[in-house]
Amino acid sequence: MSARVVFALAVSLWPALRAAAQDPSRDLPARRVAPAPTPSQALALGLERLAAGWSWEAARCFRELLLADGDRPTPHLLLALALRHEPNRAARLCWDAVRRTDGVPDGVRRLVEAYRRYFGVETHPELVDARFAVAPPRARAEALVAELRALADYGVPLASELLPIERARLAD
């Protein structure tokens, strides 16, 4: 092939190649296309995605919940559950939930305490903390399922939604 033929081929294909390529500065919208979900929608979507094993998608939903109501412990705790594959980050988020338990209903406080024991968080975790380098052991997961069962019987609605998710994780 001569250089002229290659050049002619490149010039003829250039508009098609340019149209197919995505340029984020030009192709992505400057604002959110869909409206942000309401906190109840973000919670429901996040729990569905967490149950399906889509932890990153669940984290995105719980992040919306955190933006809407960051002063409560529940969004921090749910984000910790979605990011539990990164134990150090999950421990820090769990600690953030523990710090926000003043003045919350007893059921929510007990739920946060159950997960605090599961993650093993006694003090504020460092950014890179050797105590949280690996996931919590199976014995703590079994104790968590037992505590969630008791909390579900106590009438904590979030505990009854998290119980099947934790049971499924334990079965794996």
Image (cartoon, rainbow, N blue to C red):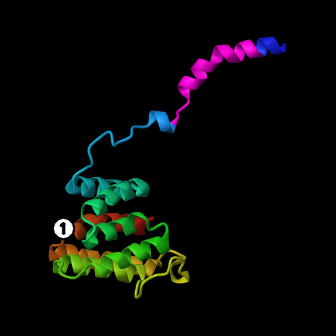
Query: Does 4 sit left or right of 121 as displayed?
Result: right
Amino acid type at mark 1: Pro
Q: Position of residue 162 (x, y in %)?
A: 29, 66
Q: Which residue corresponds to mark 1?
A: 157
Residue 64: quarter of image: bottom left
- Is 24 or 42 nearer to us in this picture? 24
Residue 18: quarter of image: top right
Q: Position of residue 78 (x, y in %)?
A: 33, 66
Q: Secondary structure at mark 1?
A: helix
Assign the N terminus to one quadrant of the image. top right
Query: Does 148 sit left or right of 168 as displayed?
Result: left
Can residue 63 be seen in the rendering of this structure? yes
Q: Residue furthest right?
A: 2
- Magenta part mainly helix, strand or loop? helix
Q: Position of residue 16 (x, y in %)?
A: 58, 19
Could you tell me which residue is drawn at 29 percent across and 78 percent down? 112
Could you tell me which residue is drawn at 38 percent across and 59 percent down? 59
* 120 over 29 or under it: above or below: below
Could you tell me which residue is drawn at 63 percent across and 20 percent down? 14
Assign the C terminus to one quadrant of the image. bottom left
* 161 over 42 or under it: above or below: below
Query: Does 162 sit left or right of 21 as displayed?
Result: left
Q: Answer whether residue 131 is magenta in the image.
A: no
Residue 119: quarter of image: bottom left
- Is 76 or 170 nearer to us in this picture? 76
**Mark 1 burial class by Cα count in 10 Å: few <14, some 14-19, many 20+:** few
Can residue 142 be seen in the rendering of this structure? no
Q: Residue furthest bottom?
A: 122
Q: Position of residue 75 (x, y in %)?
A: 29, 66
* 79 over 53 or under it: above or below: below
- Is 138 or 118 nearer to us in this picture? 118
Q: Which residues are magenta?
A: 7-23
